[in-house]
Image (cartoon, helix red, strand yellow):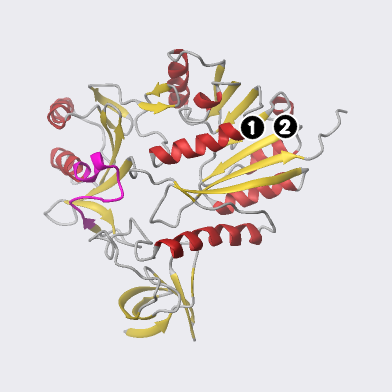
Amino acid sequence: MAEQVIIRRLGAKADGIAETSSGSVFVPKVLPGETVTIERDGSHARLVSVDEASPERETPFCPYFEACGGCATQHMKHDFYRAWKQETLVHTLRQARIEAPVEPLIDAHGEGRRRVTLHVRFPDRAMHVGFMAPRSHQIVEIAFCPVTEPALKDQAPTIARAIGEHLKGPRKPLDVQITATKTGFDVDVRGYGPLKDQDRIRLIDLAASLDLSRLSIHGDVIVERRPPAITMGRADVVPPAGSFLQATKLGEETLAGLVTEACARAKRVADLFAGAGPFALRLAEKADVHAVEFDKGAMVALDKAARATLGLRRITTEARDLFRRPLLTPELNTYDAVVLDPPRAGAEAQAKQLAASKVPLVVSVSCDAATFARDAAILMGNGYRLERVIPVDQFKHSPHLEVVGILRRDVVKKRR
């Protein structure tokens, strides 16, 4: 049943919140002050119409925005969007009882996302290729995605559809991850079972017809026609198939610039949750770096790139699960600075070890404001001062935000 409500405020995920006699209702793609008609589904609702629009509303630039779950904020005017995103971070810090100056939001969208994952589904006799609708497994079919790099914008759906056609026999749900690299497209497909020899041959031929650099299934490389290289500082890195990568090229450069600036005086740095080396390879231009990452393939890629790059100082690598085996205090005490860039779950175990250490500088990079605040609070409760908080918007048009925090120890603990 349709009903009319007034949106009072926005939540952290960009949903509008209306207060009703039966509790809060969350409505996507609306703005504070708007009167809207909705259809409820529990505490969430589908937007039927905007009856009284906010002056901060603008027309979304993507024709798929209303149906697609990929973007959440294209209906917001630029200044409102920036203020909301920054205030969301401030509010999250306050909830963790952290009062720190938050610097202006840095726009790091650049040319757009350099990686996209498209879903291929077979709910009926037809094949459907696109993104998921909000809070749904229904596919919104797309012909292009305007928030990706130009090379991906039109080509990504074409590639995903061609792969779906080749692998549609079992009608299994597929996720096709496509990354734009300096040597072409790197494609990793998830959801398909073991390949038969004839399937591999057909996929090798398909990779040639699509001019892909590399094609893999669940990280298993089917064919590598050219090494899919990503430039990181002076180095060219070939990451493992499907491995972590910063969302945009400008986002990586911006984050790395903030990290290297903070560590400018450090002679020995530990780069934890290092990935394939976006920070380590740049830090090594001035410092010795020890890079630690759970993904062994990423460590191999980093080591190979470091050895092939002139002018870098010593980089050592270690494959280690930092959630279960964080670097311990005696290990940490040998470094002038530690860089943390964990997944969304944060680095609580590692933060506790750092809190007991003598490390004078910690640079925390996070894609989740809540876990950033939790980990920062652990350090601040043990002698660290949160000197700078810099929000970096490489997930533009979404509620996600990258945060860089620079923490220094005010008083160095005496050795026992």
**Nearer-N-terminus badge (1/2):** 1
Q: In this view, does 255 lie above or below 39?
A: above
Q: Position of residue 160 (x, y in %)?
A: 20, 42
Magenta span has 153? yes
Mark 1: few/some/many CA within 10 Å (<14, 14-19, 20+): many
Rounded to the nearest angstrom, the CA distance separating label 1 from label 2 is 7 Å
Q: Give the image quarter of residue 47.
A: bottom left
- Mark 1 touches mark 2? (CB < 8 Å): yes
Above or below, 170 relative to 32: above
Q: What residue type is labelled 2?
A: Val
Q: In this view, does 281 lie to the left or right of 224?
A: right
The one nearer the camera, 374 or 195, is 374
Across and down, in percent, residue 185 comes to 25, 32
* Range shown magenta: 140-156
Residue, disc 1: 338
Q: Please give left or right for residue 285 compared with residue 243 in the image.
A: right
How dense is the environment of label 2, judged by Cα within 10 Å: few (below 14), some, or many (20 and up)? many
Q: Where is residue 113 in the image (x, y as percent from the top left)?
A: 34, 44
Amino acid type, mark 1: Val
Q: Name the residue under label 2.
A: 359
Q: Which element type, helix, strand or loop, lies under badge 2?
A: loop
In percent of width and height, residue 153 lies at 23, 45
Q: Does the magenta stretch include residue 139?
A: no
